[in-house]
Image (cartoon, helix red, strand yellow):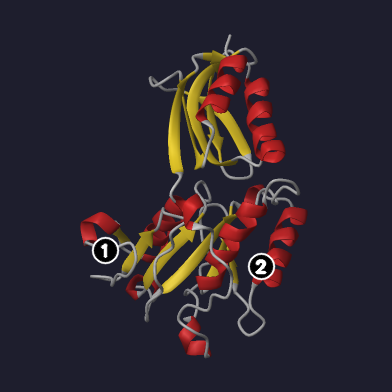
Amino acid sequence: MSELASKNIVLIGLPGSGKTRVAQSLHSQFGCELLIDDSCGLEKTDFQFTRPGSLEWNDFVNLPAKSLKQEMWCVIDVRSSLPEVGAEWLQQVLTDMLSVADGVVFTFIESASLDNQAWWSKWVVNHSTAALKKPIVRWMNQSFPADFKGFDLATEKGGNVNPSTVDKLEKTDLQQVETFRFSAERIVLDHLLMGLDNSRQNLAMKIYRVKGVVQTVEYSNLVAIEGSAYRWDTFAAESAAVGELQISGIGLDQAWLSQIVKAATV
């Protein structure tokens, strides 16, 4: 059994950052058991692991309380840097995550430019506390480095269990996390993505996930849309569940989003 297999690891990160794949990689590469919070009886605010393994934490605006003998890993997709406009809330969310993390996992390295990798490396340095710089591991081609053994616990370095000095998002924002579903069987893909992107940048709309499989004017095959908090990914798909878009975010304007989807539908 590897050293990682005996650790208590909590994976935190934005939706779409690759937490699920990282957890699967820990399992297949190091034998780290995959844990699910509901099945383990874990609480959202304060929990103890019932057995060693990795737990994927999906509530990114309500982070778990840090406990002794746990490693908190912040997972970041480095294929794109944060946009210059409309990303203040993302800066805050990621800073909150970094403040409780023992280390950072850069995902999708094989698809990230050197410029974007350097941007995120600088971001981590700039947003770490002066007393406790966050170590970084690069997850490439669905794998960790073979000799990787995890991050040292912050408490072993003389740090606090939860060394956070940043202001958290207001509770009024946290209470408005929601997902809307829209019918969109055939769309103009460019128009849809442009409308959603403008909503983010010009209206400061906090869209953090867009998922769906649709028919488009641009392509003869079905297209899967995988939007995360700061990038759009589309690829060819085969699926029977066609024609529904799921848009998730904080404090979203459902009527406005409905207009965008309707305007892009043909």
Task: Estimate the x, y position of residue 36 in percent, counting from the top left.
Answer: 29, 56
Q: In this view, does 53 lie above or below 129?
A: above
Q: In this view, does 173 lie above or below 244?
A: below
- The crowd level at tag 1 (other Cα within 10 Å; few <14, some 14-19, many 20+) is some
Which residue is disc 1 drawn over? 42
Task: Indicate the quadrant where residue 39 lies.
Answer: bottom left
Task: Estimate the x, y position of residue 136 in percent, counting from the top left.
Answer: 60, 69
Say which mark, if any, is on residue 124: 2
- The crowd level at tag 2 (other Cα within 10 Å; few <14, some 14-19, many 20+) is many
Task: Indicate the quadrant where residue 216 lies.
Answer: top right
Task: Estimate the x, y position of residue 118 in percent, counting from the top left.
Answer: 74, 61
Q: In this view, does 231 lie above or below 31?
A: above
Measured Cα–Cα span from mark 2 to mark 1 = 29 Å
Outermost residue on the bottom side: it is 158
Q: Is residue 109 visible?
A: no
Along the horizontal axis of the image, is 30 left or right of 131? left
Secondary structure under the numbered disc 2 in the rendered image: helix
Residue at image location 40% in from the left, 58% down from the top: 57
- Name the amino acid, label 1: Leu
- Name the amino acid, label 2: Val
On-image quarter of the N terminus: bottom left
Task: Estimate the x, y position of residue 94 in percent, counting from the top left.
Answer: 58, 60
